Amino acid sequence: MKQVNASPHLGFCLWAMLLCLAGSIGLAQASTVFTVEGFDARGSFKGQAEITATNNGYQFVRVINYEDAVRVEDGRTLAWVWMGKAVATPGGGWTFSANLQRADFIKHRGPLTRTQADQTPTAISGTLALDHGVLKGQFQGLDVATSETWSMPAVSTTAPIFEASIAQTPTHNALQSSTRNALFSLYASFQALPDVAPYADLSLFKNPIHTAIRDTTDYDFYQQHPKALRVINKVIDPISLQETLVRAGGSIIKGSALPVMMRPCGRVLTP
């Protein structure tokens, strides 16, 4: 009997068909992990990507580590996580979309300042086409331009390659309208301060509920990589690196309690 060897292209197409079928029949959490290699303006990177078929379509996570020559914040290695939506295209390819956060809890660093416009995330998009058994293409957006290859797809049998872990607990009930109105009237001059006024019309400000946030995301990562920074679904710039450094600081101290932050619910810029 003559042996027939299937081509990598055929194997990839069969995998893509199976993943699409999983999504079409509503098979939640069917995931495939890829090996990622590529480069952008910062340098070369390697990592993994995961496409998951859910009842609400496909989701993707991309986790990359830059080469050792790329260093930030006093010599730390740099990693980057994106999370977003994926759409299968004819011929075994994919398109991707994600929104990278800009505004968080630091407003100024050096000459860089977050403005009200930065409340709008930066949209990025990607297109990967099947080429000789691997996915090749680019991701693009403001300050984002990559060329990369996704290869060696394998059905995931372990935990996700990345998972956020954030618990938010309200510390009190919503204020009665009479109490709220009295307090807002009493502290009207505070709301008029130049650093506060831009946020006074936000719904989170108008209906304040303070929340205890326990964020254990990347705790294990920083225990294993104390000299790294991993930016999660944000743009990379001096402010986001400083914010990531603050988050990492609570995780790399062995034996310390994980940080519990108290702040109004949501991510509102602080002066």
Image (spheres, rainbow, N blue to C red):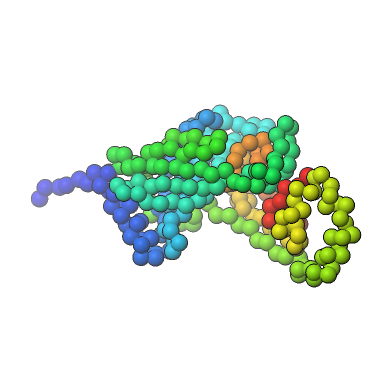
Quarter the C terminus occupies: top right
* Residue 85 drawn at (x, y percent): 47, 52
Residue 209 visible in rendering: yes
Q: Which of the 4 quarters of the picture holds residue 68?
A: top right
Number of callouts: 0
Q: Which of the 4 quarters of the picture holds residue 203?
A: bottom right
Q: Is residue 186 above or below residue 139?
A: below
**Which is nearer the eye, 132 or 183?**
183
**Which is nearer the eye, 97 or 168?**
97
Q: Which of the 4 quarters of the picture holds residue 241?
A: top right
In screen coordinates, is 178 left or right of 28? right
* Residue 143 drawn at (x, y percent): 55, 35
* Residue 207 drawn at (x, y percent): 75, 62
* Residue 246 drawn at (x, y percent): 71, 44
**Which is nearer the eye, 103 or 120?**
120
The residue drawn where x is 52% and y is 30% is: 41
Residue 252 visible in rendering: no
In screen coordinates, is 110 left or right of 100? right
| Residue projecting furthest to the right | 186
The residue drawn where x is 72% and y is 65% is: 170
The residue drawn where x is 35% and y is 56% is: 19
